[in-house]
Image: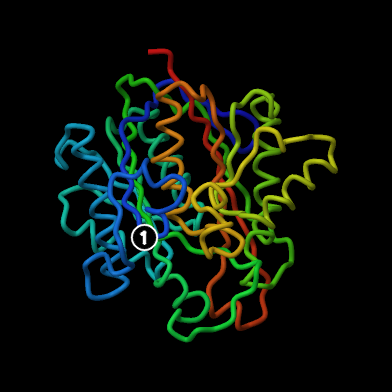
Amino acid sequence: MRLGKQSIAFDNVYVGEAAVAAGPKEKLGPLGAYFDRGYDDLYCGMKTWEKAEMRLLRDAVEQCLVKNNIGSGEVDCFIGGDLNNQIVIQSYVMREYDIPYLGVFGACSTSVEGIIIGAGMIAGGAFNRVLAGTSSHNATSERQFRYPTEYGGQKPDTLTFTATAAGVVLLKNSPTDIKLTGVTIGKVIDAKLKDPLDLGRAMAPAAFDTIDAHFKDFNTKPEDYDLIVTGDLSYYGKDMLVRMFGEVGIDISERYNDCGLMLYDREKQQVFAGGSGCGCCAAVTYGYLLAKLRDKTYKKILVVATGALLNPIIVAQKETIPGVAHAAVIERSGI
């Protein structure tokens, strides 16, 4: 059922088991115990960064299938994307599976974008089981969007540290203990910021716009959720978002956190402003948050994946950095 201009409510979309494969910093971070597999180095046993990211995604797909006790032939569609040019990680991994495939790109908002598309297919009766997945890798991302890590370039405190992780979740039409009950599709919001080393603040206005639209469309307020999380605004973007809501008389600070600050310990790990990347929101949501819903720590959460819609060519042309954010309501089903 459509609500307002941007939102959809669902009553027959359930969340199955999910899986996360993570890199070394993520494995040693505060949430490492919630991940299915962790590697000790960025190569993940492979010869290149890209192949390492492919391995992470492959691990997450395989473990998700095992945890749901299904084979790949029982999956109606895989929906996924990543940060690499032409979303090559997803495409190369999915050539190994006999599963219909939709490649999507929403930058770091891709995890929830995939969920939204998959949920619509299930709610409409077309599919019974959909896998939604995404990945990112610190070295592939740094090489593409900034400077290769090997250059040893100076990094400012505002930099967000791309997570090395992959996450995959099963959406289905048969009941489980967790439901996807609503989504809000974001709009492209351009705050006219130009610094690719400060993406958290570039994305914060998009997060504000989507969360504000979500509250209005569903007639809810922060107190209606046990937790509201954004994908990767990290320290500076989170602060900006809290202040933006404060300016309109809404206090989200008591129930709000950011996946980029949850994934790492900024006091002990050199991650600058905190985490970012497609794998950041996916790892925290599919690893930690789903576990906390299942153990009844949380009953209802709002996950808002955020993305900066830039590439190196457009930044070199002195363009601004627009952002987008997509939101999903995930809650216990009472089963």
Give the farthest residue toward the bottom. Answer: 151
Q: The disc labelled 1 sits on which kind of residue? A: Pro
Q: Which residue is mark 1?
A: 24
Q: Is residue 129 above or below residue 239?
A: above
Provide residue 305's location: percent of width, then percent of height.
54, 47
Residue depicted at x 47% and y 46%: 30
Q: Nearer the viewer, residue 83 or 21?
A: 21
Provide residue 248's location: percent of width, then percent of height.
84, 39
Q: Is residue 334 above or below residue 244?
A: above
Residue depicted at x 36% and y 60%: 24
Residue depicted at x 46% and y 21%: 296
* SS for callout 1: helix
Q: Nearer the viewer, residue 199 or 151?
A: 151
Provide residue 297's location: percent of width, then percent of height.
49, 24
Give the farthest residue toward the top. Answer: 335
Provide residue 282's location: percent of width, then percent of height.
43, 47
